[in-house]
Image (tube, grey):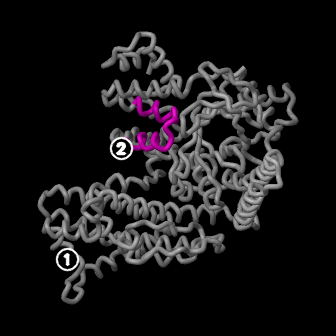
Amino acid sequence: MEVGDLEQEIKKGTKLPEEEVGALAEDVLQAGGVSLTREERPLATSPKELRKPKKAREEMISPKEAVLALEAGGVAFDFLGLASLTRELRQLIEEEGVFDFSRKRKWWEKIFRRPSQKTPVNKAFSSTSLPPVESLVSSFAEVEAKAGLILKTLPERPEEKDLNDLRLRVEAWQEIVGQWRNNLFGFSKGGLANYQKIVESQRKRLSAPQGKKGSYEERLKDLLANPQKRQRYSNIFWSEENAPQQAREAADLFLETALAVNTARVLHRLHDPEEKREGGPLDLLAAREKAAELRRRVEEIRENPSLSQEEKQRQLEELNQKLINLLIPIANKVRALFPHNTAYSLSAILAKEEAVCTGKTEALKAVCRWLGLEGKRVSVLETLNNRDVHDCLEVDSFTQTKIIIDGNYSSWHFLRSYSDEDIIKYVDQLIAKREIPASERRKAIADFKKYRANSFQIPLLSKVLIYTLTPTGRKAEKNYRRKEFEAVRICPYTGKREVWQADIPFPHLLVAPDRPRELISGGYRCNLGVLYDEQGELKKAEQQYLEALRINPNDANVHNNLGVLYLRYGRTKEAIKHFRAYRRINRKIKER
């Protein structure tokens, strides 16, 4: 789409000055050549692989879709026995020592029929697979059998709104349970056939009479046929006052649990002390002990009254370096085991054994959480071309310094020995192999010189870009000209643009972190929104973009995508609002 065409779209329904219309149109197109008609590609700011919607849909996992389908009430959740399944999943994870689910919730006993108990989380885990995972097969089969019976029964009932809503919820839960089942068990064709036999066996059991009560299927038909009984049944498990909130909390509990199961599987995949897989040896159990020891030392230093503030700072900075050394082999392993491709959720990267930048960030964030560290996904503009949207991980250190790990960005250590002439020859070789367009020769040479400058500051053991950012206390005012060894970071709390000191000459141009302690990153939501957009599911795309902005309100990419989406809706004023946010966040910061 040309600038002039986009200007016409923006003009519709607005009274903006001509110069602002032109500036907005130019900026939006510079964000990646957005195609409003979707004739050539979806939003161009997304990864290249997402331009293949059919392939991307096959690799996509949408765990929160079930929550979107949960409207008022939690009947579907209880009908399917998801509370029981959640309890089993959590017990499995606690036994594995992956997470401590001892947080108390006021409705815990009501749903799970037993009080919350604190479970120790320091047990070792197998490096192959979750040991008791097979015990869950019959539980998953029972849930799927119940879903089949409910959907079979519903068409026999009158067209009532609550039943139509129930059908939507059951279908959504059926899909997500199937996804988690596939990723947990990884059935072969023969294994899947055997699993279907177990589902059929459960279905027969549920249809068989059970004494005076009758069968589950008979009681289900009776219940669904009577609106009053349905309401009473719902109120048994969900108090009438806050049923929607409780239903969503229960759904989130299930999804958080399933996310932790996949985290356990990521840990198992990465744990490789004997280096049986590529990427170097990695003992996560030892890493966890070291992380705990570092945290203990930090507390000792902070609470030592005999140390001056300067000495405390010096010792904490030494521990920061030890933390970086702890993270390097983890980042190397993630890079080696999950080569670059479209997968971006934990489920997808495990199923496909690949990961785009968001997927690597999710894996690294999962490991950090297990180590007791705070890791956040950050949306950035890449160092060299200052334009492409990219994700990496920001880890809180023991001081105000942030550790940035970019799992998709090579450390380029081999360039240390290259002269300028060597770099020119190297670029020409890439052009001859058609890996770089000849038209970009001059820019590529400049870029590789920056790679070389960075490589001298990155630890030699690191296979990926890893560096630190330290706050300077200065704001990045409008038209701020960034210097070498400087980055601009948007504060996730205030939204202010801040100047940070980097320990490499050319860090990322813009860093916009997610809110702390988010289980699912804003980048995952954004990518899911792109997929829905490509399918023409504009309402679902909007929901994902809005959720991404809740997690990271300073993500320029999401504002741009949402603005384009609203133009398709004809909601031009709302589109302009997001285009302006994109421009505000993404003001050009020229490098000297």
- Residue that badge 2 annotates: 540
Horizontal relation, residue 531 to residue 168: left or right: right
Q: Element under label 2?
A: helix
- Residue that badge 1 annotates: 219
Residue 460 visible, this orientation: no
Horizontal relation, residue 60 to residue 341: left or right: left
Amino acid type, callout 2: Lys
Please identify the quarter of the rendering in which residue 578 is found.
top left
Q: Quadrant of the C terminus?
A: top right
Vertically, is 326 above or below 237? above
Distance from the alpha carbon under mark 2 to that under mark 1:
35 Å
Q: Element under label 1?
A: helix
Where residue 420 appears, as percent x and y from the top left, is 84, 26
Viewer-closest of 450 and 84: 84
Viewer-closest of 109 and 521: 109
Horizontal relation, residue 573 to residue 557: left or right: left
Single out the residue that lies furthest toward the top.
Answer: 18
Amino acid type, callout 1: Arg
Residue 329 visible, this orientation: yes
Magenta highlight on residue 562: yes
Q: Disc 2 or 1, which lies upstream in sequence?
A: 1
Q: What segment is highlighted magenta in the picture?
A: 543-564
Q: Quadrant of the N terminus?
A: top left
Query: Which residue corresponds to the image point at 47% horizontal and 28% vertical from the top-left?
Result: 581
Q: Are marks 2 and 1 in contact (CB under 8 Å)?
A: no
Query: Which residue corresponds to the image point at 48% horizontal and 24% vertical from the top-left?
Result: 28
Magenta highlight on residue 328: no
